Image: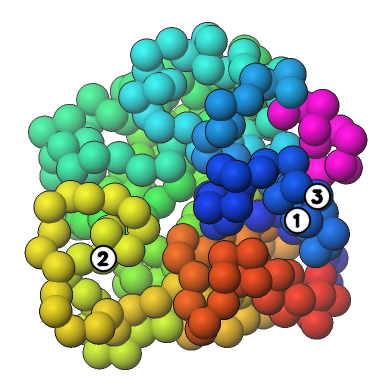
Amino acid sequence: MTKLPVAVQVYSVRDVAEKNLADTLKKIKEMGYDGVEFAGLYGYSPEYIKGLLDGIGLVPVSAHIPLVEMLEDPDKTFAAYQTIGCKFAAVPFVTPERRPGGDKFYETLDDIARLGAIAKKYGITLLYHNHDFEFTKIDGKYGLDVLYDTVSPEYLQTELDTCWVNIGGEIPAQYIAKYTGRAPVVHLKDFNLTGKLPAHLYALIGIDEGEVKEDEPSSFEFRPVGHGMQDMPSILEASVAAGAQWVVVEQDEPSMGLTRMESIKTSREYLKSLGW
């Protein structure tokens, strides 16, 4: 099987990245990662980030950029990431009113289509990074599928997050296959779940939506790739078959007694054990 280059979402190690981004990126390279995906630039200029990555030898694959930031000044936003060298930019998350069934869902589809057209002018392909709420159905069809059916592939490609696809009720490898030819970047995310999903699910990814916290320990936790419930070999095989260009490791919160850095190192070691 053809092997794809492996990147890591820097959000996974945000605690150390905030303290020393240069050192963190060097260690990421030493772990064997080929590239990175950003979620914020930690106060540094695009020019500095580009120089840093060039010196270390990491590819700036993509960036998660809040939708409101993109809408506020699309040209300034995409020009900055063009300077860094990112080929992809992802809508990382949307607020409740913009989700399937929300008052602004269809407005959001229009916004994304418009942003995708602007991004293209800067040589950047817009992606959408899903969670589980996009698997709410509208007239019998998942909101996520409505999004991709509505916005042209010319302006929007997928960044399927395999953890959230699974939580949403679908088999990740099969869903990746469904978007063959439209799945350039795939998020490798593993998890463990015993019993029902916790009520404060989004609090686990650092987002406060006023969810009620439960007193009992969570039955859900993110895991390093290869150390949870996901069938990673099938996900990797499906990614290659679908024409993916990159796979990106992401772990929102550490587990198993590991630090954030130890978690992404464990993920990379697992992938190396498969020959990746």
Q: Which residue is mark 2?
A: 201
Secondary structure under the numbered disc 1 in the rendered image: helix
Which of the two labelled residues, at mark 2 and mark 3, occupies the earlier sequence position? Answer: 3
Q: Is residue 107 left or right of residue 240?
A: left
Q: Nearer the viewer, residue 200 or 138?
A: 200
Look at 80% across and 36% down and name the residue there.
53
Q: Which residue is mark 3?
A: 26
- Which image quadrant is residue 270 in? bottom right
Look at 34% across and 24% down and name the residue there.
68
Up-down: is 260 above or below 19? below
Mark 3–mark 1 Cα distance, whole angstroms, equals: 5 Å
Look at 65% across and 71% down and name the residue there.
262
Which region is colored magenta?
49-58
The answer to whether the residues at label 3 and label 1 have Cβ atoms under 8 Å apart is yes
Which of the two labelled residues, at mark 1 and mark 2, occupies the earlier sequence position? Answer: 1
Display colour scheme: rainbow
